[in-house]
Image (cartoon, helix red, strand yellow):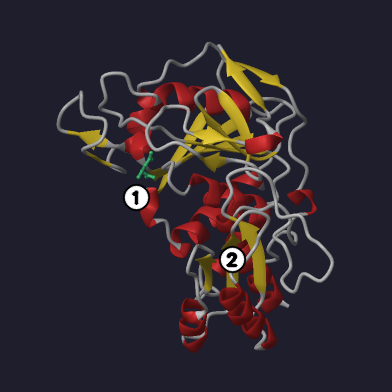
Amino acid sequence: MKHQHLVILGTGGTIAGRAANASDNLGYTAGQVGISELLATLPVPPGAEPVISEQVAQIDSKDMSFAVWATLAGRVSHFLAQPDVQGIVITHGTDTLEETAYFLQLACNPAKPVVVTCAMRPATALAPDGPQNLLDAMAVARHADAKGVVAVCAGTIHSALDIQKVHTYQLDAFSSGDAGPLGYVEEGIVRLVKNWPLANEGRASSAIKNIVELASLAEWPRVEIVMNYAGASGTVVEALLAQGVQGLVVAGTGNGSLHHALEAALLKAQVAGVPVLRSTRCLNGRVLPKPGDGIPDSKGLTPVKARVALILRLLSAGQG
Ligand code: ASP
């Protein structure tokens, strides 16, 4: 049997962050330490498979761009196609981790594990959390049955579908909401409490037909998020329509409720051919549709993930 490889792709984030002072967990610069340097600090278990690492980007994930997504999806699909690659680990900032994870799930729909990991403290911290998260992510990537895009942080495994950053500072910054996590990593052992995620789970259309094409796209579909709140109006939607927005997601209040002025502007957008999805600004639960709703619900996707799904829907429609 061929040696199975793990592939580790670095994109930056706090896990690769550097601060001038080891006790400073805030005043650091993300995306400074190279992926090979991060890997060099980790213990190598006896008999561990060879690791291939690649620096795909070196950014703070607040600055995540379509260009980086295109490169990342290209490298992920390249390595997934290699028969001797067991799985992929991606180091990423926590701020937009859930968007990248969901984008990769939809775009690549992997039958092998793609494990996104991160840290809340920089690599230079007195007690950095990145090395343990990276080790845990590698344990998930080498699990025989693992598949799909998952994220690992603070010993917890989340599906790309359900993960959300819910804390600004604590090490266990993510939650899978009322769906709950997929499982845990304990001393290098994966303990699943749910099944590995099913492809896309019926929430959005399937994989992009040509991942390679993403890199040469001049422009990605412009999809923006608007929010309902006290005193909301239709002016932001009207301004976006005037600028040629191609899709809209609305983060409604409660069960997707909308101020009547905002709703009227969104209905006008739909009539003008701009698709709109209704999600909720609530942290838990999903928008439950009811008869007479003029705007379709996001099938449980959070506003940022509904935006990813709509971007990919528009992209795959463009691919014919
Ligand atoms: N701003 C950082 C990033 O998302 C935060 C982090 O990684 O924790 O890259």
Q: CA distance from mark 1 to mark 2?
A: 28 Å
Q: Residue at x 57, y 15 (%)?
A: 188
Q: Residues within 10 Å of mark 2 (few under 14, many from 20)?
A: many
1 or 2: mark nearer the eye:
2
Percent x, y of residue 248: 58, 72
Between discs 1 and 2, the one toward the N terminus: 1
> Considering only vertical position in the picture, is 243 above or below 3?
below
> Considering only vertical position in the picture, is 146 above or below 98?
above
Helix, strand or loop under label 1: strand
Name the residue tied to disc 2.
Answer: 250
Q: Residue at x 49, y 24 (%)?
A: 154
User: Which residue is nearer to you in this view: 138 or 181?
Assistant: 181
Q: Residue at x 47, y 81 (%)?
A: 235
Q: Where does the C terminus fall, quadrant-wise? A: bottom right
- Disc on res. 152: none
Q: Quadrant of residue 55?
A: top left
Q: Is residue 137 visible?
A: yes
Ligand 1 has an atom within 8 Å of the beta carbon of the residue at disc 1: yes
Percent x, y of residue 135: 49, 22
Quadrant of ligand 1: it is top left
Name the residue tied to disc 1.
Answer: 59
